[in-house]
Amino acid sequence: MRTIGMIKSVVVRSKALAFAGVMSAVMFCAVAAYPARVAGNPPSAAAGEPAATGTEVKIDNFAFNPAVITVKAGTQIIWINKDDIPHTVDSSQGKFKSAALDTDEKFEFKFSEPGEYPFFCRMHPKMTGKVIVQP
Ligand SMILES: [Cu+2]
């Protein structure tokens, strides 16, 4: 029947359009993320300290780096967004919550109590990390 043929072709065309939309969104993200990666500073392993004991967590290329950071109680952690898109830093336990951080914006939180503090980006919940606070 002709009618069915027409409906089918309309459905196929809208699927193709949706696919094209997704592809261009993916490509845009890839392009947007690229300059941030190139501009990223070299890791600062100053004073021969292991990288994971510093107090700065970079947000770059949709990831927290380092993802797990161990500090002494009383340490202030600074997260800095090096991506070209906004991210957040949210405690999984509701202990802290940043605003949306634009490029080069920072969020700071001082960890006074020993324990483990998982966190994530509420815009991209697959972005996760953890602060381990030792006595
Ligand atoms: Cu994010």
Image (cartoon, rainbow, N blue to C red):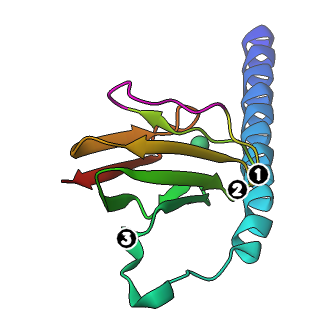
Q: Which residue is farthest bottom?
A: 48
Please identify, in this view, whether the residue under mark 3 or under mark 1 is nearer the observer: 3
Q: Which of the image's four quarters has the N terminus?
A: top right
Q: Give the side of residue 73 with respect to residue 19, left or right.
A: left
- Residue at 76% from the left image edge and 51% from the top image edge: 103
Q: CA distance from mark 2 to mark 1?
A: 6 Å
Q: Nearer the viewer, residue 126 or 109?
A: 109
Q: Position of residue 55 (x, y in %)?
A: 46, 62
Of the image marks 2 and 1, the number of the one nearer the N terminus: 2
Q: Which residue is mark 3?
A: 52
Query: What kind of residue is marked 2?
Result: Asp
Query: What kind of residue is marked 1?
Result: Thr
Of the image marks 3 and 2, the number of the one nearer the N terminus: 3
Compared with 21, 31 (above or below) is: below
Q: Tell whether position 7 is magenta.
A: no
Report the disc number at residue 83. Answer: 2
Q: Position of residue 65 (x, y in %)?
A: 49, 63
Q: Which residue is mark 1?
A: 103
Image quadrant, ligand 1: top right
Q: Main secondary structure of the magenta part?
A: loop
- In the image, the segment drawn in magenta is 92-99
Compared with 29, 10 (above or below) is: above
Q: CA distance from mark 3 to mark 2?
A: 20 Å
